[in-house]
Each structure stands twice: as structure tokens, then as C-alpha cells.
Image (tube, grey):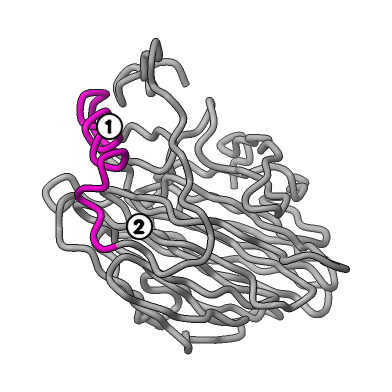
Amino acid sequence: MDTKVLRHYPGRMADVGGVPVLRALPQRGRRMVGAWCFLDHAGPSHFESGPGMQVGPHPHTCLQTFTWMIEGEILHRDSLGSEQPIRPGQVNLMTAGKGIAHSEESLGKPDFHAVQLWIALPKDQRFMPPRFQHYPQLPRLQSQGVQMTVLAGAWMGEQAPTEVHSPLVAVDMEAAQAASATLDLRPDFEYAVLCLYGDLQVNGELAPSNELVYLPDGQTTVDLQCGAGSRCILLGGTPYEGGVMIWWNFVGQSQEEIEGFLRDWHNGEGFGAPVASPLPALVAPSLEGVHLRSPGEAAAAD
């Protein structure tokens, strides 16, 4: 396999609700992988004291939020009236569509580790009605010494139950012992691999835990060399034509559209009933004097 097609994109550290996260998407060099437009690796963190993750009510538009829980517990509340804990091995999937608000709070467990993603909805379905779904069980399989959980899409004959609206895939992979695996890929998909912990090589190249390793479409296999006790996540999907614009918690197609979402949030309109959370709602940063790059401008700059 030609390893020259691999591209490495270092992530950046951020803080979300008191939890350190590595933000792997979006970044200047790589905005999306298929319809996946946001990837935070949150933790692992250990809270000796204090409340843990605390993210007050905030809005989303034109996307799905996808939370994969590895350690700890979070309570999700939203403006549809949903109130759902998420525990290790489970997925919470929230479809924002035309607009939804939610909050996330740790439930007192000292350890926290999760992967949080956004999926940009197809352009003709961006304003679908909002929805929340909880998935307590997901397909698991073992191949070539790697334990795999299929989070979204189809993988090696297994189909995840998570309801997504674009051709995509997400797989969590663990290796208790050192393992080498050659995995089949769809040539119409682009892919990315993020090491969550341990030692990992992709096509013979080191894949440190602070870098996203990107594989363009057109490839049919990928080689993973997994160290004992390592874990990674693989994402893929058909390239999202035209891209999206992301600002704060909004996904849109123009600055005017996002300015409209911002006005609605400030005015208490368009995001459903107040979220039944004790936490204060988040205040959106000002857009005054800010020029957001259009999806086309962002793609040209990458």
C-alpha cells in the first residue's frame, strides 16, 4: 500500500465544561471526514472532587450530535423533554435539525472518557424535526485480534442501529494484546483514524494520540498495528459536497443563516421548550465584526 496517501493533522487542546479535550475536527487542514464535521476526544479525566463535566443548555442546528461513552456517566437533558443518562458502551444521538437545545452533566462518577462527534445533516434534510435517541447496545465483533464496536453504519457484516442520514461509518477498536489487522475499506469513502490511547501505527506510520490520520477516498484497505492495550476510533463516509460553515454550536451554509440562528437563541425562539437543567444557559460569543468563511472559502484555504 502506498503510505504517501496518509495525512497527519495535529489536534488542539480545549476545555469543555471543565473537561480537557483534544479537538481533532474541525481544523484548518481538515474540516470534515465524510459528513463527520466535529470530533472531540474528551478525557480520560479523573475528578478527585468537584462536579465533573458541566455544560449548560446550549443550541444546535442542522446536525446530529453523537456521544460515545467510554468511562463515567452523563445526564442528557434537552428541549424536547428528554432526560437520559448515558453509560459506558452506549451512544446518545441527538438530531438537531431545525433547532434543539440540550445540557450535559456528569453523574458523580470520578472518571470520565468519551468521544463526542457531530454529523452534518444532508443539505435537503438540514431542517428536519429534532429528535433524541439512546442506544444502549451496539454490534460487537472480533477480527485479527481486535475487538470492534460498530457505532454507526455498516462494518464487516454488522449494521449499527444508530439512525444516520448520510453514507458513513464509525468503529471503536480495542486490542488487549498486540495485533496487526488489514481492514477492507470502501473506495468511495474517505477515512480518518484517531488513537485514543496506547501505541498505534497506520500503514506503518506512527499515529500519536494527538493527531488525526486521514486517508483520502480511493483506498481499498488499511493496515493497523495495534500495541497491547491500545484503542482507536475509525471514521469514514462519502465526501460531503460543498462543506459546511461551523460557528460556536451552529452548523449552517452562510453567515446570514448563522446570524439568524444566533438571534433566535438570544430571543428564546426556535429551540423548543426551556431545558430542565439547573445549569445556566450558555451565552453565545458575539459575531460583531466577524467575517465567517463560507464553506467554499474554507475549502480553498485548507
Q: Which mark is residue 258?
A: 1
Which residue is tagged 2? 101
Q: Is residue 85 magenta?
A: no
Residue 276 shows in the view: yes
What secondary structure is marked by label 1?
A: helix
Place of residue 146 in the rendered image (x, y in percent of width and height, measured from the top left): 67, 77
Residue at left offset 26%, top offset 63%: 273
Residue at left offset 40%, top offset 61%: 102
Q: CA distance from mark 1 to mark 2?
A: 15 Å
Under mark 1, the amino acid is Ile
Closest to the camera, between mark 1 and mark 2, is: 2
Residue at left offset 56%, top offset 56%: 55
Furthest toward the right, the residue is 48
Residue at left offset 26%, top offset 47%: 268
Q: Place residue 2 in its image quadrant.
A: top right
**Which residue is nearer to you in this view: 160 or 124?**
124
Q: Place residue 92 in its image quadrant.
A: bottom left
Would residue 60 appear left or right of 302 to someone viewing this image? Answer: left
Q: Which residues are magenta?
A: 252-273
Furthest toward the top, the residue is 289
Which callout, 1 or 2, points at the residue further toward the start of the chain?
2
**Which residue is nearer to you in this view: 77 or 134?**
77
Under mark 2, the amino acid is Ala
Q: Is residue 270 magenta?
A: yes
Place of residue 4 in the rendered image (x, y in percent of width and height, measured from the top left): 61, 34
What secondary structure is marked by label 2?
A: strand
Rendered view: 172 above or below 217: below
Place of residue 57 in the rendered image (x, y in percent of width and height, measured from the top left): 44, 56
Rendered view: 77 above or below 127: below
